[in-house]
């Protein structure tokens, strides 16, 4: 059991989940801890004596290892691929510089090519590998609804470098009791309980102070109740992950522990005795050897007769002898054995869990690509197109605004042109009567349209 669990209430066992405290359960099968309450996720935000561990950082989870436990639980389930889709849709077709103008009361986007950028901006993006930097903060945002960036500044306050730190490797310092602010962050690759030489303290960055020194800034989607670590709504799928994770284990155990026999062929012993009468052989031993050899050959022929795609629905003929009273004598019988595993209920349960997980991640079955054994699943191509376009146009607005904040801070600090903006280029799915290719990239003409102006596009 991970360090820190022993500090909570006496465990209460309920099936495969052990209840350690209100809102927190540990799976005895997977070893995962499922936390749902603010007290357990942010214990130092609700207790009167924060961090009774004696450490200066706010624990992330009762054992300070919540992010890694969640990652392990999600990555063990196909739900991980859904998060990859969210990251991909957040990224769209990548970053795009642009300017904005208004024509006839409509906002028009004018793309700016990289070759047209001032040398200072082009060099900054190249030296900071800004494309991969942005993909890193997108990954963290989709997992945690926040991300951390270290801004390295010159003496004049201009930003020289930006570094993305994996959010799971960062802990907030306990809030200042006087002003409630977080004054610093702690970095370590050895959470939950690093030694002193395995963590570093970095001051918080003040984005509003034009002369502030280097430091870490936490960008986040505003949380409704968390003080240190915002929690996305999709984290509520953890109990469904526990259910979904049991089904494959049950099926694998069933496969490993089952004896699968299709036919039981009954061959009377008299059949072999009649074929090998004793008088043909020198003694009984020679007769038994002949019978044994005949049995093996007969079984092989039966396998050839009953198995394989060429023997489907094949007819098998036998002769039946009767005694003096007309009763049938022992004869060959082929009995088909029922192999009813009765796993349909489990598969339905898995389908329900998969749908709950997909919904919890904010995706429709169409986008999730669900094909489930209970009949629930993705819809038509039109449904996929409409759901995808809805997600791109509505659900990505706030996340993208948050992940573009570093550029806005850098632009203001470094005095870059105010009319130069950074955004994400989208792909909009279309029906084939609108576009032969079935899609159109933002700020580009539709492949089948007659509009040759690739600069002006209404967002």
Image: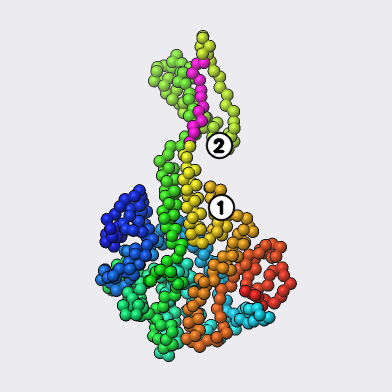
Residue 50 placement (x, y as % from top left): 29, 70
* Structure colour scheme: rainbow
414 over 78 or under it: above or below: below
Quarter of the image where the N terminus is located: bottom left
Quadrant into which the C terminus falls: bottom right
Residue wearing tag 1: 377
Specify start and end residues of the magenta stretch as a single range.
Answer: 328-339
Query: Could you tell me which residue is drawn at 29 percent across and 62 percent down?
Result: 4
Within 10 Å of disc 1 (Cα), the crowding (few <14, some 14-19, many 20+) is some
**Membership of 335 in magenta stretch:** yes
**Which residue is farthest bottom?**
156
- Going 54% across and 18% down the picture, which residue do you hit? 320
Q: Nearer the viewer, residue 37 or 273?
A: 37
Relative image position of residue 458 (x, y in whole percent): 65, 75
In the picture, residue 200 is in which quadrant?
bottom left
Left or right: 424 in relation to 246: right
Is 385 placed left or right of 332 in the picture? right
Q: Nearer the viewer, residue 398 or 409?
A: 398
Magenta span contains residue 26? no
Residue position marked by numbered label 2 in the rendering: 308
Mark 2: few/some/many CA within 10 Å (<14, 14-19, 20+): few
Q: Secondary structure at mark 1?
A: loop
Q: Nearer the viewer, residue 395 or 267?
A: 395
Q: Could you tell me which residue is drawn at 57 percent across and 26 percent down? A: 316
Residue 202 in sight in this render = no
Magenta residues: mostly which secondary structure? loop
State the residue lying farthest toward the top.
324
Q: Earlier in the sequence, mark 2 or mark 1?
A: 2
């Amino acid at each position: 059991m991970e360090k820190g669990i022993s500090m909570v209430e006496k465990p209460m066992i309920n099936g495969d989940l052990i209840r350690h405290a209100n809102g927190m359960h540990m799976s005895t099968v997977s070893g995962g801890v499922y936390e749902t309450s603010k007290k357990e996720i942010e214990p130092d935000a609700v207790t009167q004596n924060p961090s009774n561990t004696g450490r200066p950082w706010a624990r992330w989870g009762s054992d300070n290892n919540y992010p890694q436990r969640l990652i392990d639980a999600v990555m063990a389930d196909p739900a991980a691929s859904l998060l990859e889709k969210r990251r991909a849709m957040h990224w769209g077709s990548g970053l795009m510089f642009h300017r904005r103008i208004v024509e006839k009361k409509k906002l028009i986007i004018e793309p700016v090519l990289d070759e047209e950028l001032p040398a200072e901006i082009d060099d900054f993006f190249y030296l900071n590998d800004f494309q991969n930097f942005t993909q890193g903060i997108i990954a963290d945002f989709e997992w945690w609804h926040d991300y951390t960036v270290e801004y390295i500044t010159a003496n004049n306050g201009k930003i020289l470098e930006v570094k993305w730190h994996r959010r799971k490797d960062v802990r907030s310092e306990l809030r200042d009791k006087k002003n409630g602010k977080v004054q610093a962050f702690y970095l370590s690759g050895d959470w939950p309980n690093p030694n002193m030489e395995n963590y570093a303290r970095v001051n918080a960055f003040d984005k509003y102070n034009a002369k502030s020194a280097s430091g870490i800034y936490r960008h986040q989607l505003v949380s409704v109740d968390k003080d240190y670590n915002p929690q996305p709504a999709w984290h509520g799928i953890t109990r469904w992950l526990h259910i979904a994770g049991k089904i494959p284990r049950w099926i694998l155990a069933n496969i490993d522990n089952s004896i699968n026999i299709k036919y039981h062929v009954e061959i009377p012993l008299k059949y072999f005795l009649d074929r090998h009468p004793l008088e043909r052989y020198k003694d009984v031993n020679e007769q038994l050897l002949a019978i044994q050899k005949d049995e093996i050959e007969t079984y092989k022929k039966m396998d050839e007769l009953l198995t394989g795609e060429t023997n489907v629905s094949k007819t098998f003929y036998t002769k039946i002898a009767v005694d003096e009273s007309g009763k049938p004598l022992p004869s060959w019988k082929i009995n088909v054995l029922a192999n009813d595993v009765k796993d349909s209920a489990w598969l339905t349960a898995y389908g329900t869990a998969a749908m709950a997980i997909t919904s919890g991640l904010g995706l429709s079955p169409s986008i999730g690509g669900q094909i489930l054994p209970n009949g629930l699943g993705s819809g038509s191509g039109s449904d996929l197109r409409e759901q995808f376009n809805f997600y791109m146009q509505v659900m990505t607005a706030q996340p993208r605004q948050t992940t573009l904040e570093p550029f806005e801070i850098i632009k203001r600090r470094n005095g870059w042109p105010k009319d130069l903006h950074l955004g994400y280029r989208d792909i909009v799915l279309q029906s084939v009567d609108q576009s032969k290719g079935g899609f159109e990239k933002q700020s580009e003409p539709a492949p089948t349209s007659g509009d040759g102006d690739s600069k002006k596009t209404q967002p």
